[in-house]
């Protein structure tokens, strides 16, 4: 079906991925930790049929959400650029990220998929944003 591309509305599909996963009892696929969030788990869909269809076929359509993009587009500007590299470096130095647009998620800025966001990741994001070759680097694309 590939409706995500046709609709061109990632937020809607990402919301559905998150909602369906949490209501099923799975971990939040985006790694969000919203303090005080209450999830109504009475029903994941309008009918059992919808839930069964989701559970049966959702996995056939690629990874859930834009997890990889938050690794590089750390401020959700819909582009990976030098600002993302600077913000990743700033975060790795322990500086305040208030009012920067930094996405508070487990994988934000972790461009080499090693489980941490640090100056190496900032350098990789800078390299990518300048259009330099990413071959022979630890850049990961999940």
Image (tube, rainbow, N blue to C red):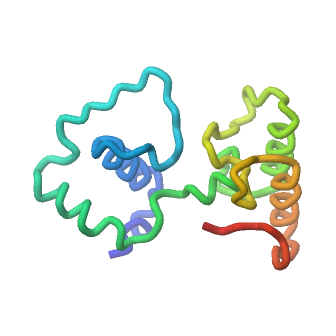
Give residue 141's position: percent from left, percent from top.
66, 68
Dividing the picture into quarters, in which one does residue 50 lie? bottom left
Q: Is residue 38 left or right of residue 95?
A: left
Locate residue 43, reporting x and y percent. 18, 40
Q: Residue at x 63, y 58 (%)?
A: 69
Residue in front for this viewpoint, 85 or 136? 136
Give the residue at x 40% y 64%. 7
Quadrant where the image shows the C terminus: bottom right
Identify the residue shown where x is 20% and y is 64%: 53
**In the image: residue 83, left or right of residue 141:** right
Q: How far across and down, in percent of the image, does residue 132 sit?
A: 88, 73
Quadrant of residue 60 within the rendered picture: bottom left
Please name the residue shown 36% across and 46% down the image. 26
Above or below residue 56? Residue 37 is: above
Quarter of the image for residue 140 reads bottom right
Q: Quadrant of the N terminus?
A: bottom left
Q: Is residue 9 above or below residue 61?
A: above
Q: Is residue 27 left or right of residue 95?
A: left
Query: Residue 36: horizontal and vertical position, in percent?
Result: 44, 20
- Residue closer to the observer: 141 or 4: 141
């Amino acid at each position: 079906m590939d409706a995500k591309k046709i609709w061109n509305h990632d937020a809607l599909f990402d919301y559905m991925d998150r909602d369906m996963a949490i209501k099923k009892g799975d971990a939040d696929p985006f790694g969000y930790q919203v303090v005080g969030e209450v999830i109504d788990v009475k029903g994941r869909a309008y009918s059992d049929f919808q839930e069964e269809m989701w559970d049966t076929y959702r996995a056939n359509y690629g990874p859930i959400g834009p997890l990889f993009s938050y690794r590089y587009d750390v401020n959700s500007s819909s582009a990976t650029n030098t600002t993302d590299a600077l913000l990743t470096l700033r975060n790795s130095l322990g500086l305040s990220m208030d009012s920067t647009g930094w996405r508070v998620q487990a994988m934000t800025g972790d461009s080499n998929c090693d489980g941490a966001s640090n100056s190496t990741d900032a350098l990789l994001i800078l390299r990518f944003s300048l259009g330099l070759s990413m071959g022979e680097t630890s850049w990961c694309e999940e």
